[in-house]
Amino acid sequence: MDNCTYEKLDISGLDAWFGDKQALKGVSLRIKPKTVTAVIGPSGCGKSTFIRCINRMHELTPGNRVSGVVLLDGVDIYKSVDSMDVRRKVGMVFQKPNPFPNMSISDNVVAGLKLIGAASKKELEAVAEENLKAVGLWKEVENDLKKSGASLSGGQQQRLCIARALAMRPEIILMDEPTSALDPASTAKIEDLVKTLKAETTVIIITHNVQQAARISDMTAFFYLGELIEYGETRTIFESPKSPLTERYITGRFG
Amino acid sequence: MQGKKSSSHYNRQDAVFKYLLISASLLVVGLFAALFLMLIRGSLPSILGNGLGFLTGTTWDPINGIYGALPAILTTIVTSLLAVGIAIPVALGIAIFFTEYAPVKAKFPLTVFIDLLAAIPSVIFGIWGLWIIAPLIKTYVQQPLVTSIGFIPIFGGPAYGISLSLASLILAIMVIPIIASLAIELLSRTPITLKEGMISLGATKWESVMRVGLPFARMGVIAAVMLGLGRALGETMAITMVIGNSYMWPFANPSIFAPATSITSKIASEFYEATSAIYAGSLIELALTLLIITLATNVAFRYIINKTNKEAKR
Amino acid sequence: MRMVSRKNKDRVARWLSLAITVLAIIPLLWIICSVVVNGISAINLEFITGVPAPYGESGGGIANAIFGTLIINAMASIFGIPVGILTGMYLSEYATKGKFSSAIRTSVESFSGVPSIIFGIFAFTIIVTNVRHYTALAAAFALGIMMIPIVAKATEESMRVVSDDMREAAIALGVPKWVRTVKIVLGVARGGVITGSLLAFARISGETAPLLFTALFSFYWPTGIDQPMATLQVLIYNFALSGYQERVLQAWGASLLLVMLVVAINIVVKIVTRQKYKEGI
């Protein structure tokens, strides 16, 4: 039965290189829609490379090479689609919040639409409000919408970046350690936010904090040295991991 | 609302934009090439008509068709070297004062002064040099010097006021801010660790600058000098107004108090009268010579900087 | 004993460098004072509204020169600033290590070292000889070329220091490269580009040599941009050397106006960039 359903993301045999160094080896997994998948593993295991292959940002690295199949809603994102289209369907939130300092808060939220003139002024205002509410920022900024996006605190900036990604109505949101640069209070807010996001979209989140993975994700993928070691329901991974490597990582024996 | 246009539309936009940028850049390269070509073409009547005598001749007599540019070339080189020679110690003095001894509150006003000095138009230096400084220099500096050491040919009389030395002085003032502001930047970038090392050894500020700051900034100072020299070589208006425009120096009168003519002042003052092809061609050949001297100086400096960098890396 | 002489050296250095600095500032103050003192008496209504009187006659003004400087500067800016910005953008965001990019960099670098009179001659040989008369357009061309390296360098440097985080955010949103370059990177860098353009404008306001063989001079109101045109710079040069005391006085008046323009722009730029340092942008 599993073989017949379209998954949101269907990855088979994904290899990726930086020049001579192979960062990903034969990664295959299927991600269901409207789930939160945590990607965990020690530094240098290929987590960042992995998600950057999903929105084709890995292509920006010099000396990059990718092979394998990545199907988003059944469509091969490397063959049939232009990279720009992929990125409009797959949003990304970065480790260090990066709102555009030369744009206002509301303009930051709708940047993906406004910059290419995709909507009218009224539509943009509505989108900004909707997404700021979705990330819980609306009350905090509704009187300061014209202020620079960089004038907010770190945690607020990150939520702004999430709103910016959300405003594109992406099929998937990729998050690269979104809370590692933030304080515990902001981290908690964002973790709660991530849990609500799966009603609208599919989330893949890298985290180096295994407790965070346990808290917020439905599925967990454990990477080690470029290979996908184990992938399954979070509860299973944490309570009865199949691989001893997984178990050692989760219990903090290394990484 | 997801962007109604397809990617091929955006890719086309990107291509158009890229070609726009490339066109602008090509224009710049093209203009540079055209500059050389037009100068060479314009100089041809002189290159063919005057030959090498242009560079070695010491007489400039358009009426009789004699075009010797050597005095002008020498004047340009000597005034520029003198100007830079005066400017370097002054600029370094300013930079040292700024980075080591100046009170914090004085620093911003100081940078304002330096930048303003650099921004004053050259024709203003000219009018000031001509009408205010020349008479004063003639009476209070040149004349006394002529009286006292005038037996030495380069300090010989009469004291004209408007002269090679005045031109060098005005040029020096114009060049000082260029070198000073760069030197300040460079000295400010001395790694704090090196400075603290010196201070912890009980070094004075002077020693710190001389032993650590300046050596560290050496490359940049050389580059700054190159920029200042380039400015001096190319300066036209201020020089034209205070140098006297005469072929007296150096062969008729080697005194620095004598009037002279630089390449730029010659072109500026004679271009309107250059009605014949060879006259105009000679002036354009002068311009070409100046361009070559300027670019050669740049290349030479860059070579020195690169070579010293390579040796430092070993 | 040695320590005392080391301290003395330091003290001497302190006072000597102070003296040198003061000495170097004196010319600036002297020039500004001279220009103000000599120029202010020349400024009256006729001066600002009238055209020059022939040599030897009294009265007249410099209004056509003020106008001419502004027009020529504006034309030069329309040419030089966009080309400079586009070139700077290319060097920052699109350039490779290849030969073409090196050629552009070399050209831009070399242009900034070329003496200004040579640009005047270049414009003369390209434009004036072809249309057979002096023309303000040629002056705008020469001055515009001089602006290009200043604006290009300022643009390239301001864009280069824009953090890659910004570029990545824009890429991840799927906006086309040109949008990212112009609206995001240039948007963040725009302060540096603006100050570079202002400085370029101030720079050409101070240049006279390129105007000599292009716009020449005129005692009349500008009749067209393809004709000779009076400018403050050339007026100062001509009048200061004219030997007619009243014209010399007017040259000082024109100098005052020119200095005010250039100083104003530079002070504005200085204040704006100082604020930038404080805000840490």
Image: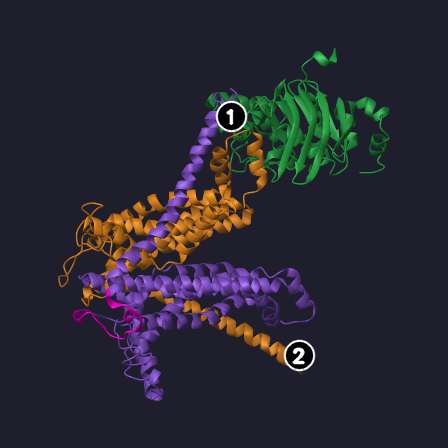
- Under tag 2, what secondary structure? helix
Chain coloured green: A
Q: Nearer the viewer, residue C102 or B6?
A: C102
- Tag of residue A113: 1
To the question of a shared chain for discs 1 and 2, the answer is no
Q: CA distance from mark 1 to mark 2?
A: 70 Å
- Under tag 1, what secondary structure? helix
Query: Is residue A128 one of those drawn in magenta?
Result: no
Visual hue assigned to chain B: purple
Q: Nearer the viewer, residue C67 or B76?
A: B76
Which quadrant of the view contains residue A198? top right
Colour theme: by chain
Quadrant showing the C terminus of chain C = top right
In the rendered structure, the residue with mark 1 lies on which chain? A
Please tell me how crowded label 1 is: few (under 14), some (14-19), or many (20+) other residues with Cα within 10 Å: many
Q: Amino acid at mark 2?
A: Met
Visual hue assigned to chain C: orange
Image coordinates of residue A118 in percent, x first then y, are 48, 23
Q: Against C83, is B60 above or below?
A: below
Please name the residue shown 15% across and 57% down the image.
C53
Q: Is residue B201 visible?
A: yes
Image coordinates of residue B65 in percent, x first then y, are 19, 69
Q: Left or right of C89: which side holds C167? A: right
Q: Against B28, is A80 above or below?
A: above
Q: Which residue is mark 2?
A: C3
